[in-house]
Image: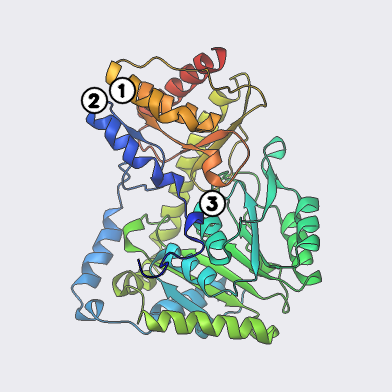
Amino acid sequence: MRNNIVHPGADQLTYEIRGIVKDAHHLASLGVDIIWENIGDPIAKGVEVPEWIKDIVKNVVSDNSAYGYSPTAGVTDAREAIVQMRAAEGRTLSSDDILFFNGLGDAISIVYSYLNQNSKVIGPNPAYPTHSSAEAAHSDSPHVSYELDPYKNWLPSIDDLRNKVKYNPAISAILIINPDNPTGMVYPRVILEQIVSIAREYDLFIISDEIYANITYGNEPFVSIYDLIGDDVPTLVMRGLSKEIPWPGARCGWIEFHNRTSDSVFDRYVTSLFDAKMLQVCATTLPQRVLPKLFSDPRYTAHLQEKSALYKKRADEAYKVLRSIPGIIAPKPEGAFYYSVIFEDGVLNNNQTLAIETKEVQEFIQKTVQEFSPDKRLVYYLMASTGICVVPLSGFNSQLHGFRFTLLEPDDQTFTNLLSKLKESMEYYISR
């Protein structure tokens, strides 16, 4: 090319959750029956959307207004529905401080793209790659993170967070994913209060990704960050429809801006996000038209409770199985629908294998894993041997060796069989 057209942060764009798919499809072409535990798509796992929700969508589809542009900030009725929902929770929010996006992936991309390149956002580690990659790419530098401790049920280290904020003056915001992905940890109120205190002390804003806010089932109650920020800590709260209905293909997410006018620089930044969305015209109209009808339906609360109860059942069963495997640390999740486990130091090495039935598959795996981290090597052997496709924790910007799988399987016996295969494979692999 006449000029270098590559963005300076292009090498920071990685997404192991989907990166493994190409190789998984290749294994499938070689006869391996793949069990897709790598991605949080309930529909792909066979979860059925309730008929009453489908009926709402059908009725909205028949309305001609569902086919046109929406206002840039979002459909007025949808924003008002969110305002009313927050009011019922005892919170004050203006419809002018809500901005819709084509899913939170779109929101995350715009949030980091329009952040000053010299500003950094510190986030949890293990890190969700959509956030960590977008943040690293915007600044063309490695993502800075604070540690989640698997030996303390994945709770964040406040000392680590405070020290990194103190000694990295480029840090302008703290990212929270609550409930967390990939760990399923729900932030305790006291931890959130400490994070808000750090943000207040160092004049930072907060990004709170709460896409799983209505999917909690542990002993720790969910507390939204906007219950704790007072009137002086600027905050972005991210929410969406994809995990709750579930309707990931709708690509419908939004940001709620709190304490926007408490800081003039933050207010100008928020304005730039609205302007950036205006250049795209608007977010997809159909799911926004569905949202107010969905949230006002008395069956929706029971729907969320039913989903959470299933994930609790899955988490309890998985915990009982995984905690018995020597060399594995497996804190039980309390929210979202993921389970992350790690291996103790020294458990994994580059000589361990699993039995693979066909020579062609074996040769492909042996060639592919040569430069892999120990946990990614394990993941590929697991996939080739059992068909179970999980995600290595090293793919979440983490130095920990482990993997993440989902709690989405709707069939009880299929999930039990999955856990049995995981346990048998892990015990064999570790013993090699």
Q: Which mark is residue 161?
A: none
**In the rendering, at what x and y percent does residue 191 appear?**
74, 55
Of marks 2 and 3, which one's residue comes earlier in the chain? 2
How far apart in space, not on screen, are marks 2 and 1 (Cα)?
9 Å
How far apart in space, not on screen, are marks 3 and 1 (Cα)?
30 Å
Q: In which image quadrant can residue 121 be found?
A: bottom right
- Taking depth in this image into account, of 121 and 304 the one nearest to the observer is 121
Q: Is residue 155 found left or right of 386 in the rendered image?
A: right
For label 1, the crowd category at 10 Å Cα-Cα, with few meaning under 14, some 14 to 19 and many 20 or more, is: many
Asked if one can make out residue 338 in the rendered structure from this viewpoint, the answer is yes
Instruction: Name the residue at 40% across, 68% down.
Output: 5
| Secondary structure of the residue carrying numbered label 3 | loop
- Taking depth in this image into account, of 139 and 385 the one nearest to the observer is 139
Q: Is residue 43 found left or right of 215 in the rendered image?
A: left
Q: Which mark is residue 128?
A: 3
Label 3 is placed on what type of residue?
Answer: Tyr
Q: Which mark is residue 31?
A: 2
Which residue position holds label 1? 361
Q: In which quadrant will I find the C terminus?
A: top right
**In the rendering, at what x and y percent does residue 197 appear?**
79, 66
Q: Is residue 4 found left or right of 171 in the rendered image?
A: left
Instruction: Name the residue at 52% across, 17% down.
Output: 351
Contact? badges 2 and 1 (CB < 8 Å): yes
**In the rendering, at what x and y percent does residue 332 appear?**
60, 36
Label 2 is placed on what type of residue?
Answer: Gly
Of marks 3 and 1, which one's residue comes earlier in the chain? 3
| Disc number lying in front (3 or 1) | 1
**In the rendering, at what x and y percent does residue 1 appear?**
35, 66
Q: Is residue 411 found left or right of 122 in the rendered image?
A: left
How far apart in space, not on screen, are marks 2 and 3 (Cα)?
31 Å
Label 1 is placed on what type of residue?
Answer: Val
